[in-house]
Image (tube, grey):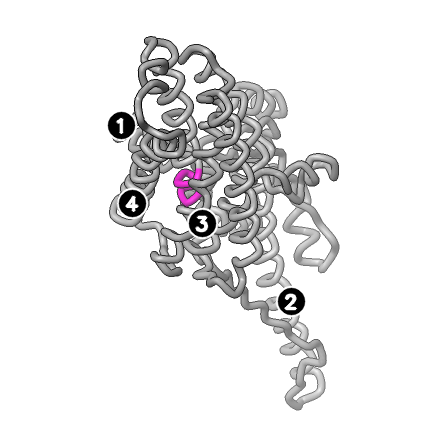
Amino acid sequence: MLFLPPLIQLLIFGYAVNLDVNNARIAWMDQDNSPASRELLSQFQGSGRFLIIAEPETDAQMQRLLDRATVDAVIRVMPGFARDVERGRTTSVQVLLDGTNSNTASIIANYATQTIARYSNEVMMQLSRSKMVAGTMASGGAMKPAVPQITTRSRVWFNPDLKSRNYFIPGVVVNIITLVTLSLTAMAIVREKEIGTMEQLMVTPIRPMELILGKTLPFVLVGLWDMLLVVAASLLVFHIPFAGNFWLLVVCTLLFLLTSLGAGLFISTVSRTQQQAMMATTLFFQPFFMLSGFSFPIRNMPFSMQLLTYINPVRYFMEIVRGIFLQGTGISTLWPQMLALAVFGVTILWLSVLRFHKQLE
């Protein structure tokens, strides 16, 4: 519970959960067979993002490739492509996508659109130069192009390589701390009930607050240890960028531990067996996880579900960890999330302590 699960979860998310599309498998269907279509083909081959594994000649072959998921997309050059390009007419290239995985399909469609647009710009420049040369020869003097040129330069902040791994692994830190501290705290006290030693503790001179501290403080150390373990593995194994302040991350982790330990203590007071505590932990953890923004952006959720995320402490800790890792965000920006964690943590822990104190009395 302390060492292996965090490392296993980190490795699985780091290596297996990857939304990047580096080499899309495509089929090239050239129904024009012209120098222009072969030049477009060279654009796809030289982009480094496509792997051409088939060249179907008929619609049946093309459909079979898509039906069997042999390729992710088919690039189809229609007849008359070169003729339209040479005459300056509008022409088209058909991109057929396997939409089973909508995320992969949208990424490949974007790559294909960029490649075709790059080829189109080169063709337009060639046609413009040809008209300039023809006009110069006709007039006997140099001609200046009247068409303005626009150059686009893109800059990506916080995750320049656009790696999904850099986005997911900081969220794994949050999930591991939540799951481990919640489950261990929930089972620690209920185990005393299950084996019959709670009555022995109740007749000792130990006060209720001392018993609570003795049961929860070790898991504070466990949560901090798991945080250090996962952060170190993220930096050393996966080379995740860490742009923020490490001590700010430690302070925010302590604030979040108030919530997770308080929730675990509450589960322990309402459970009679460890099995009930584990089931209740799953009941708490799954909504926390799904509404935290770990996999699905909160802004894409229905409005009613977005409102529910405001009472989810994991959401605020997720924003803090990703902000510290990727953006280097400081207290001046993160103080609303830190305040929310403090309010949730103190309230949940206080209510749990009251219930546990009443049971001991």
Does the rendering let one see residue 122?
yes
* First in sequence: mark 2 vs mark 4: 2
**Tag 2's secondary structure?**
helix
Q: Which residues are magenta?
A: 166-174
* Numbered label attached to residue 321: 3
Image quarter of residue 313: top right
Q: CA distance from mark 2 to mark 4?
A: 60 Å
In this view, 37 is above or below 182:
below
> Which kind of residue does numbered mark 4 sit on?
Leu
* First in sequence: mark 3 vs mark 1: 1
Image quarter of residue 242: bottom left
- Residue marked by disc 1: 4
Q: Are the residues flagged by discs 3 and 2 in contact, CB closer than 8 Å? A: no
Q: Nearer the viewer, mark 2 or mark 1?
A: 1
In this view, 163 is above or below 219:
below
Task: Please name the residue shown 30% across and 35% down the image.
Answer: 218
> Which kind of residue does numbered mark 3 sit on?
Val
- Residue marked by disc 4: 228
Does the rendering let one see residue 268?
no
**Tag 1's secondary structure?**
helix
> Which kind of residue does numbered mark 2 sit on?
Leu
